[in-house]
Amino acid sequence: QVELVESGGGVVQSGRSLRLSCAASGFNFRSYGMHWVRQAPGKGLEWVAGISYDGNNKFYGDSVKGRFTISRDNSRYTVYVEMNNLRAEDTAVYHCAKSRDYIGLREAFDMWGQGTVVTVSS
Amino acid sequence: QSVLTQPPSVSGAPGQRVTISCTGSSSNIGASYGVHWYQQLPGTAPKLLIFADTSRPSGVPDRFSASKSGTSASLAITGLQPEDEADYYCQSYDIGLSGPSFGTGTKVSVL
């Protein structure tokens, strides 16, 4: 079954940390770039971070640069995002998404997970 | 902040044709980066509708089509159906952001 399943969301206080996971199945995970995209309540989509197929190249949106770290474990078919110094404005549904190519900054995202909810309380 | 602008909403009667615009600049669409389109039904994850300006993934009905010209792109839905009620987003790479950017989103309503 081809799918992405996120986990790790929850309610966290401002300034604390959280790690999200995304487990992939049904495709050759090692060959594709993976990304995190978030959606604040009632708002649009915002690209958060991306990682190349081999984990050697990592990219971040301006709003999370220096606070979030993306990583992947190809042996476990899993991509992660470590979120530090969380702020109220980080409250959102976090989706992981698969790129159509090995990095994916310019390519479309052809598979999405249902998302995990992160709520940052002040 | 989005560098791609879409109308907040469009509507049409069943069977009609509606179009959604996506206006960018020379830093994204105008720089010949591909435009992609997504459909997000209420309470669900986004779904890829169009990639690389005009290509449809397998399984996407040919009622959905797209085009690009200059610094803008557009998505057309012909033969509008009730199940097309959703939010639609464009996406392209932006040089200034050094990453992908999504459009502001458009809600399509079927009257």
Image (cartoon, coloured by chain):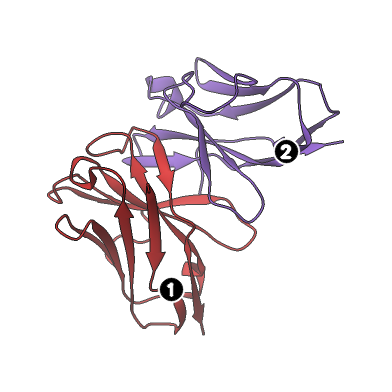
Chain colours: A red, B purple
What residue is shown with label 2? B83
Q: Which residue is drawn at 55% across and 61% down?
A: A40
**Distance from the alpha carbon under mark 1 to that under mark 2:** 30 Å
- Chain of the residue under the numbered disc 2 shown in the image: B
Given residues B12 and B101, the one toward you in this image is B12
Residue A50 is situated, as x and y percent measured from the top left of the image, at 29, 49
Judged left or right of residue A105, residue B106 is: right
Q: Which residue of the protein is positioned furthest toward the front in this rendering? A: A1
Q: Indicate which label's residue lies in the foreground, 1 or 2.
A: 2
Q: Which residue is pictured at 43% across the width and 73% down the height?
A: A9
Which secondary structure lies at badge 1? Answer: loop
The percent position of residue A64, horizontal first and vertical second, equals 35, 61
User: Which residue is found at the position 12% from the left and 49% from the top?
Assistant: A56
Q: In this rendered view, identify the residue nearer to me: B91 or B17.
A: B17
For badge 1, the amino acid type reads: Gly
Amino acid tagged 2: Glu
Whether residue A63 is visible: no
Can you identify the residue that label 1 sits on? A9
A102 and A56: which is toward the camera: A102
Q: Is residue A117 above or below residue B56?
A: below
Q: Are marks 1 and 2 on the same chain?
A: no
Protein chain holding label 1:
A
* Number of dots carrying numbers: 2
- Pointer 2: residues within 10 angstroms few (<14), some, or many (20+)? few
**x and y percentages locating residue A44 in the rendered image:** 57, 51
Query: Mark 1: few, some, or many residues within 10 Å (few <14, many ≥20)?
Result: some
Q: In this view, does B104 lie to the left or right of A82?
A: right
